[in-house]
Amino acid sequence: MTELNRDAIQAQLQTCTSKEATFKELVSLSKQLDRLTDAEKIEENKVKGCESAVWLIERQENGVCTFQADSDAKLMRGVLAVILSLANGHSKAELQAMDLAAELNEFNLSSYLTSSRTNGILGILKRIKS
Amino acid sequence: MSFDANTIRDEFPILSMEANEHPLVYLDNAATTQKPQVVLDALISYYTTSNANVHRGAHYLSDRATAQFEHARDRVAQFLNAPENSYVIWTKGTTEAINQVAHGLEWCIAPDDEILITSLEHHANLVPWQQLAFRTGARLRVLPLTSKGEWEPEYAHYFNERTRIFACTQISNAIGVKTPLKDMLAAAKAVGAFTLVDGAQAVAHYEVDVTELDCDFYAFSGHKMYGPTGIGALYGKAHALDVLTPLQTGGEMVSHVTYNSTEFNTLPYRLEAGTPNIEGVIGLSAACDFLACQDREDMLIWEQKLARYVYDELKFNNDIEIYSPATDTTVVSLSVPGIHTLDLNGYLDSQGVAVRAGSHCAHPLMAQLGVSSTLRASFACYNTLSEARRFCDVLLEAIEILGDD
Ligand SMILES: Cc1ncc(COP(=O)(O)O)c(C=O)c1O
């Protein structure tokens, strides 16, 4: 599984000074996200309320959570890579204590997180904590 | 009078903006149009010279406001070429107008009655009827129209003696196709059904003539025809509006109230509860004036020319599927199999090009087309050929960037 490095991703996104640059960075990040198999893209793994289809699965090993996520839209896969870089490797208790939405705001992604997409993303964060 | 997009453009202050460091190319006009200076001026002028509540009388400003408000009603009636014995009722927009009719006719719908719509409807002209059917036990039926807006003769039986209401859009918002309104309205009238036309997508482009359409109800939104948001109208023949149960009650829609009874006011006030959107009404009237000053025929030809340009540029591209017709439309709705429309939209937006990606509030139609969403470029009078060209160029760039796996 590809290791998603939070600091590297954040540094990379911070350099983007235009919407176009952020777009291209998200497309490139989308390639770091391991795809789910069709067998994993089932209804119960689907996160409701997203404009594109989003699936999220969680594994726990020795109390540490690892998430895998996928979407049919690339930009969303890029955003998912950012979210997983935040969430992976923490325990459930740690995740519940974290303000994931606030941390996500540090990635210079605001224009991609606004409007109708926000609802979907909040749903993803909620599911990660639950 | 001759029409020139570059001249008219100057009347829309917002169009000189930049978006994401690129000149704004606004091609989301089917969602809402931008507003000309005359409409903006009308709103400011109302608040600086006439603001007061209407029909409450008794002072100078109220008289001014009421006069402008009622003049606007006449203005819109003229805009629609409304016949004698009909009324314009102010609503928030198309959605509220349709909901008023669906609620208002509930009393005359019996189980086993049929409510007929078409397969090209916006959810606003689908869900209110579906919910009415649920409440009454009536059956919602959907006349299958092809994505070219054709109606096959074998479907004539959809209009029958049980059909109580026929509601149909004039133009599909999702793919920009016209419906065969004339034939369908004739079939609906032949079986004695109430008829409603959803004109939301028509008013900006076509000269509407409700006398010629001869429908019972016509619904539209101001914001899609260069007017303000939050205002629209329900046009209706007097005998049809007369039988509607008001959607809301209270305020000036009554003539006499006791604790045990209420006598409703006459039309149009009976269907307008509460203080109306006065600024919206005045802005909508200004939008009608704006359109009346244009050569509507030339304007439409121009808008269609832009859509046709995009269609011709993209039609031979094997990556692209177009769902809109080649001619007689101001919209190009398309998809690129293998690339999500939201991703295409994201790149277009990063280049300042505003379009719409999604299901366009028409889930059943998307299912009929076999897609979950489309990318829609929709043109208005102020769009230029270079904007149409820019849309095509940026779309092809997007496909290039996004299509590599
Ligand atoms: C065909 C059609 N009907 C109804 C509506 C709803 O209009 P409004 O949201 O202004 O009420 C729209 C708006 O998108 C439309 O395109």
Image (cartoon, coloured by chain):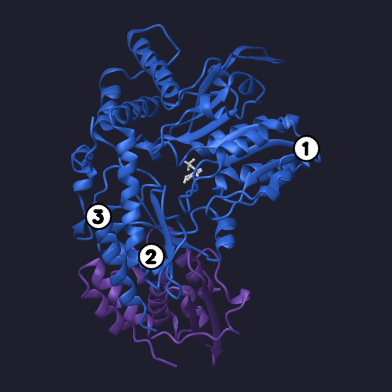
Mark 1 CB lies closer than 8 A to ligand 1: no
Under tag 1, what secondary structure? loop
Residue at x 53% of width, y 20% of height: B87
Q: Picture quarter containing residue B357?
A: bottom left
Q: Position of residue A56 (x, y in %)?
A: 53, 78
Vertical side of B344 occupied by B24: above or below: above
Distance Cα–Cα, label 1 vs label 3: 49 Å
Kind of residue at disc 2: Lys
Please state the chain letter of the residue tagged with numbered disc 3 in the rendered image.
B
Pick the front one: B281 or B329: B329
Kind of residue at disc 1: Arg
Q: Which residue is mark 1?
A: B162
Please state the chain letter of the residue tagged with numbered disc 2 in the rendered image.
B
- Which mark's residue is nearer the viewer, 1 or 2? 2
The answer, for residue B24, to whether it is visible in the render is: no
Residue at x 33% of width, y 58% of height: B310
Q: Which residue is mark 2?
A: B315
Task: Return the mark for residue B387.
Answer: 3
Q: Picture quarter containing residue B14?
A: top left
Mark 1 or mark 3, earlier in chain: 1
Labels 1 and 3 in the same subunit? yes
Q: Count neighbours of disc 1 (C-alpha within 10 A) and say few if under 14, some if 14 to 19, many if 20 or more.
A: some
Q: In the rendered view, does A60 fall on the left or right side of B350?
A: right
Please state the chain letter of the residue tagged with numbered disc 1 in the rendered image.
B
Mark 2 or mark 3, earlier in chain: 2
Residue at x 42% of width, y 70% of height: B336
Q: Colour of chain B?
A: blue
Q: Colour of chain A?
A: purple
